[in-house]
Image (tube, rainbow, N blue to C red):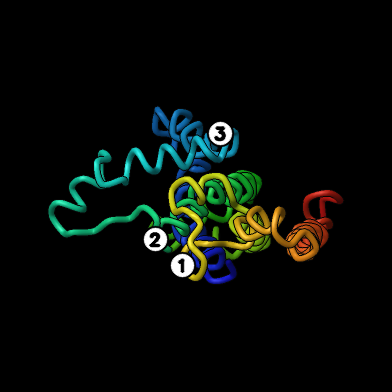
Amino acid sequence: SLQTSVIAALISCLFGVPLAWLLARSRTRGLSALRVVCITPMVLPPVVGGIALLTAFGRQGLVGRFLYDWWDISLPFTRTAVVMAQVFVAMPFLVLAVEASFRQSDKGLEEAARTMGASPSRVFFTIALPAARPAILAGLALAWARSLGEFGASITFAGSFPGRTQTLPMAVYELVSVDYRLSLVLSLVLIFISVGVLAAMRDRWMVGR
């Protein structure tokens, strides 16, 4: 669980931060539709998300068919599938947090840098990213916590195979009818992690500091 959730959070950050920058700064038409696509996993039932991933990346899926036929790659029911499911449900949290920070940042500094000849990439890495660092860290923490607690999409797309694809929430689900006390302990671990993440972000998100 720790391994896959950390990988998923880092992947979410790698792709989510540039996407948040695009949504916050670009004036291209159609970005509202892209934003809807990005946040849709937040409102979808996780099992539906897992079915969508299975439909797209299964052996007979839209993409998975080509991966299997050309390169003999099968993604469902693997550890990679766990990470993909976690990224699917977690990245929207990071994107929304970072996009809000980019929108609230001082655009005057960026415009000044551009007038002095700075390229868009240099403006992004030297001005925008440092200013958005608190939001990126908060979004990264949210993405990690959401990945760690992911269940529905993961069990649908990756299954629950001990030692390979079984995560902590899956173990809790299976232990309820076998060892209730152990399932309770594992549930408390997940609760403490969630509360800890929210407490760490309290000043920024609830108090507005």
Mark 3 Cα-neighbour bin, 10 Å: few <14, some 14–19, many ≥20 = few
Amino acid bearing label 2:
Thr
In percent of width and height, residue 57 lies at 32, 46
Look at the image and tell me in which quarter the N terminus lies.
Answer: bottom right
Q: What residue lies at 52% left-to-right and 54% top-to-bottom?
A: 86
Q: In this rendering, does residue 105 appear at all?
A: yes
Q: Earlier in the sequence, mark 2 or mark 3?
A: 3
Q: Earlier in the sequence, mark 2 or mark 1?
A: 2
Residue matched to label 2? 78
Q: Which mark is residue 44?
A: 3
SS at badge 3: loop
Q: Earlier in the sequence, mark 1 or mark 3?
A: 3
| Up/down of 20 relative to 2, above or below | above
Mark 2 Cα-neighbour bin, 10 Å: few <14, some 14–19, many ≥20 = some
In percent of width and height, residue 119 lies at 38, 59
Tag 2 near tag 1, CB within 8 Å = yes
| Up/down of 207 relative to 61, above or below | below
Residue matched to label 1? 164
Work out whether residue 177 or residue 88 is closer to the camera in this orientation and state it: 177
